[in-house]
Amino acid sequence: MKLTSLTVGCTLLLALMGGGCLMAADAPLNKLTPEEAQAGWKLLFDGETTKGWRNYKQDKISDGWQVVDGALTRAANGAGDIITDDQYDAFELSLEYKISKGGNSGIMYHVTEEGATPWQTGPEIQVQDNKDGHDPQLAGWLYQLYQPEIDKATGKPIDATKPAGEWNKLTILITPEKCVHTMNGVKYVEYVKGSKDWDQRVAKSKFGKMERFGKPTKGYISLQDHGNEVAYRNIKIREVK
């Protein structure tokens, strides 16, 4: 998959997580700035290898995940869901993703290897082509649990995603006090994992019958193979103490 460069006309992204203000087009790919390193950020993908990732319940990563033009890419059938080598409890995660036309994927957190799949324990942030995708759960939503407020101009939930084939920046804050998803600089949702509201929503969802869903407070981060081509880059994490 050939990756296109980011447009020069994109808005300034505020790197409040210890990075200063940089135009996205000027930011180095798969690198930490000195400010980010000082603030405790680390890379989960070096831009050259699949080091740091393995398939769910496996000790290595399949050939279906490849590094293509500096992006960790689900590029072939049989890739399988992958997870980080390390586990995390409270953290900030920042990454960019590019989804294929009609494509679907997902990012899960607090994943343990107790279930048959990562999403049986770890909540999923949806990744999808919102225009031609087939899932009613849209990109950036917490799957079946939380979605953005209604945009008064459209009468539909706020949608800040870019079209298939373009890069989107997704940031995720996960702490016991609050969890926040931000898509391309637009805040989507805020919730408290394990709260009364959370428990009520889980009970009404397909996850309500899964004994371990959402219960772990520490676990792996997972990237989902949903059968479509998807690429991830600039995958960075900062643990929150």
Image (cartoon, helix red, strand yellow):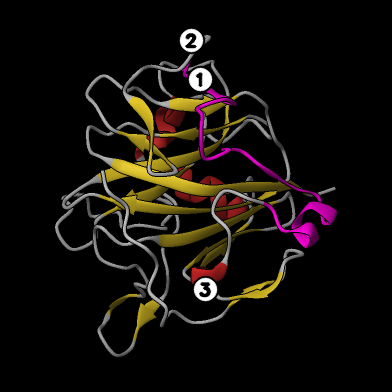
Task: Name the residue nearer the viewer: 147 or 161.
Answer: 161
Task: Name the residue nearer the viewer: 90 or 213.
Answer: 90
User: Do tag 2 and tag 1 residues touch (Cβ < 8 Å)?
Assistant: yes
| Residue 222: percent from left, percent from top | 49, 33
| Real-space CA distance between mark 2 and mark 1, rounded to the nearest whole angstrom | 6 Å
| Rendering quarter of residue 162 | bottom left
The answer to whether 6 is drawn above or below residue 98 in the figure is below
Q: Earlier in the sequence, mark 3 or mark 2?
A: 2
Residue density around tag 2, few if under 14, some if 14–19, many if 20 or more, within 10 Å: few
| Residue 170: percent from left, percent from top | 49, 59
Could you say whether the residue bearing mark 1 is in a helix, strand or loop?
A: strand
Which residue occupies 72% across, 66% down? 19
Which residue occupies 35% across, 67% down? 161
| Residue position for label 3 | 185
Q: How many marks?
A: 3
Could you say whether the residue bearing mark 2 is in a helix, strand or loop?
A: loop
Numbered label attached to residue 54? 1
Which residue occupies 45% across, 26% down? 82
Q: Could one spot residue 204 in this view of the protein?
A: no
| Real-space CA distance between mark 3 and mark 2, rounded to the nearest whole angstrom | 35 Å
Segment colored magenta:
32-58
Task: Name the residue nearer the viewer: 221 or 21.
Answer: 21
Horizontally, is 172 left or right of 118 in the view? right
Which residue occupies 48% across, 10% down? 58
Could you say whether the residue bearing mark 3 is in a helix, strand or loop?
A: loop
| Residue position for label 2 | 58
Q: Residue type at mark 2: give it.
A: Gln
